[in-house]
Image (tube, rainbow, N blue to C red):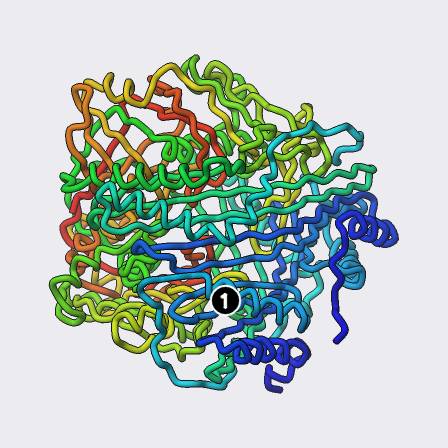
Amino acid sequence: MSIEDSEIFTKNKPLVDFVITEGQNLHLDYVEARYIHLTSEGYTFRNGALLGGGVTRTDGIGLRVLHNGNLVFLTTAKLNRDSLSELVRRAKSKVLAAKRKKPIQFSQEPVVEDEWKTPYQIAFAEVPVEEKQQYFATMDQTLHQEFGKSLPNRTIMVSLANELKYIATNEGSKIFSEKMQPVLHTFNTAVGDSGSEQRFFGIGGTGGWEWFKNQNILQQVRDDTLGLVKTAKHAQSMKLGKIDVIISSEVAGIMAHENVGHPSEADRILGREGAQAGESFYVDLLKDGELGSIQLGNPEVTIIEDPTLPGSSGFYLYDDECVKARPRALIKDGMLNELLLNREFAHRFGVSSNGAARAETYDREPIVRMANTYFKPGSYTLEELAEDINHGMYMKSFSEWNIDDRRYQSKYVGLECYLIEKGEITEKMIRRPILELTTRGILGSVDGVTKSFGSSHGTCGKGDPGQGVPVWMGGGEVRMRGIQLGE
Amino acid sequence: MQNNFSKEEPEVLLNTAAELIQKSGMDEFIAQYHSGYDWQIRFSNSEQDIMKEWEIDKLEVFLVKDQRTTTLQIDIPTPTIIEKKLKEASVFMKNSPPNQLYAGMEQSIQTPPSISSLFDSRTKDLVENGSENVYHAIDAALAEGAKKVSGVLYFGSQITSLRTSHGFSGEYAASYYRATLRAFVGSESSGQDLLCGRNLDDFSTKMKNVGRNAGKIASMAVNPKTGIAGIYDVILSPTVGGNIFGEITDAANPLLTMLGMSPLQDKLGAQLGPESLTIRDNPLLGEGLNARPFDVEGTPSQVTPLVENGKLINFVHNTSSAIQTGGKSTGNSNFVDFGGGSQILAPFTSNIEYQPGDFSHEEIIAESKKPTIYITSNWYTRFTNMMEGTFSTIPRDGLFYVENGEIQYPIRNVRLSDNLLRMMKNIIQIGRDVQQVQWWEVRTPTFIPTIKVADCHITAPTK
């Protein structure tokens, strides 16, 4: 059955279309209405005890109007014609009152009518509450039985979301979608000889209740927690000096996201996020060079941004401006290659949008966002990368991280980290090694990427008011040469 | 065309909600209803980017049955929708285990304190003249030498009405505004200032001052030198102090302690800072953006000293956490969002208020003879270990090297990598320039002055 024929859309599609018609009747240049029906089911457990849980359903329409070069965004959960008509009138009144000197314009994009859906077998709503809670309680029991007093504090936070969305524009585009999104986070504290270590771990993707079994989530959580417990027990501080470093796909992923993905966002480059998430050091690079001719890293570095990755947290086939999604090579063979664009900033750059507009919920405006950002896998195995290191480190996971608001200088503190000696990853664990590096320092040190692909889930925050969107980060494991560890 | 909703008066709505909840067989409940509007004007490159409006019409419900709990959030509540959600909630709770965090809610009915100046009726006028005020601020920044200006102005008002199963009924109206403005002279020289409050007296002048201050800092930050890692005394502006020390004051919370997210787990009674340091949780401060006369259980708001003469003397509590720790509720009960549809009834801080110190901002600079770094703004504070308080944060905007009592030159590209508890213990000067800060990086409204800390660890990239 087409999702367009579902009860939710049958009832609410006419209201969205009505908003568009009202906007056309008021002769507004561009009208976009985004209806979202979101069911969120959440649980928080601490040491096996349920602290809170519930199901929230929200329905609403976010209306964006661009008229005479000015932009407004209004939202409502009052889904009836009188209120929606009033909403459109208020939008017109506000947009006429705005007086920009430099008009905002959107790029021309194909008009599309389509639908997409993430596949699932078992909808979350079909699974009894008791069964779900038992699954997470069992997860906690497993950790407690295995790790006992070494793991005194265990928190599990679960989100099971089903999003039904219909977007329509006065240009004629109409996109229906359904996305089923499970996310699980753990926040654990392990104790050992050196004190305590903490780990915030996230796994997410698309799928129904079967995702937990198919992805072997219980095993993933257990394995991750083992790393934390080992670190608390065995990690020693070491003065290593300048070494070669292999980072896992988790660490490579966060670097791809923070050091490359974010500065590639065109709205940051052109200043729209200036007062919040900041700008981008790409501004200086683009003053003197063009995309395709600016070297940012070694030729081994290719960073892909791809919303169409099946099963991924950041998955979509059309963005929130009805632009078809596709993979984007942000960096290709070390060269700055492509930016992330929505229609406003595509126009500013004189190109087409590459489908990077996303909004977290109906009451947030769509802005330029990442989806799934990763180091393109290369040709090595992990063993081959290590073979060529006489004295170095394998950073498997990280704890603390941050980066400046131009996305130039970053810090990643290792959590589960192993000494590499004479070409072998040993069992000797290094306590809290610090990578404090510039983006060029990272990308200019890479000389090998494995052929494997790993992914980590994250919630990327941006915008004001803040919107967190689900993303993946990852790729191959990466070797960097000549890294001086931080103090 | 038949409407599928009706906008009820809060009292009527809550009466209906209370009847339906009682009919559904709940042992206890809280029903809180919000109605109003929020607006936002965002600007960048010295121009308005977008104006946004959100209508608020939301009912939040906390339910208890046989020690099982759940929360509901209902937009545009009507009797039909409330009834439907209650049926779903009953099924959910029946299949859930008892909530060990829940030990009870406020049962007594007490008269809440009156807080003046929560509501300024002129707030709605900002829908018409908000843009004009934004452009005043932009122009003021440009006049100080800025080349472009970005920022945001939020404002709004709402009525909050509460009903509990123990007979509490209360309502209050509140309005607010808050603005952040960032002025840029170059891509590496910028300055930021903030403004927040409720009273709109002299609003236009205040906005111009925000622009002027941000522009001045940006102009001072031109041609920054690369900072050098080392140990420095550090001067934290109110914005920065509100972020860093806010991680301590927000963590004076039994829920966060239980989860391992607080460095204060065994610190009650411990000396955290100098004797000149006194901090309280104060929901009665009218201009404070989290001011309210009662918490979500109907417990009257009260001032709770957290740190007195440097010693940690209290955590914030609600009824459940107080019962479990043998104390008393401090009137800080909230619906705390843990994401994904799951809210928890738990304590949380309201407005944080620092007692002013003895020094002006200028005196603090003038007394900084040894190498000192002055941080005007920061972001991206993250932890290696929240129980230890080991963290780092990135300075942004004007960042200055101070020596011999004067700002010598601007610097860039360094990080403050330290420990929260060590920093609080090493506070050496507290200013008297208290201002309220709340923005993207400071979520709890905090009234805080400039603060100087000794011997902080500054790091820089190695490659």
- The image position of residue B384, as x and y in percent, is 37, 40
What quarter of the picture does the C terminus of chain A occupy? top left
Above or below, comparing residue B275 to residue A179 in the picture: above
Identified at 45% across, 39% down, the residue is B203
Residue A401 visible from this viewpoint: no
Compared across the picture, whether B368 is left or right of A230 comes to left
The amino acid on which the numbered mark 1 sits, given as a three-letter code, is Gln
Instruction: Give the percent coordinates (x, y) of residue B356.
Output: 43, 19
The chain ID associated with circle 1 is A
Q: State the residue in front, A34 or B102.
A: A34
Nearer to me, B209 or A37: B209
Q: Is residue A206 above or below residue B274?
A: below
Quadrant assignment, res A109: bottom left
- Expressed as whole percent of the image width and height from the top left, the position of residue B47 reads 34, 57
Residue highlighted by disc 1: A215
Please, what secondary structure does the residue beneath circle 1 have? loop
On the image, the x and y values in percent for residue B136 come to 36, 46
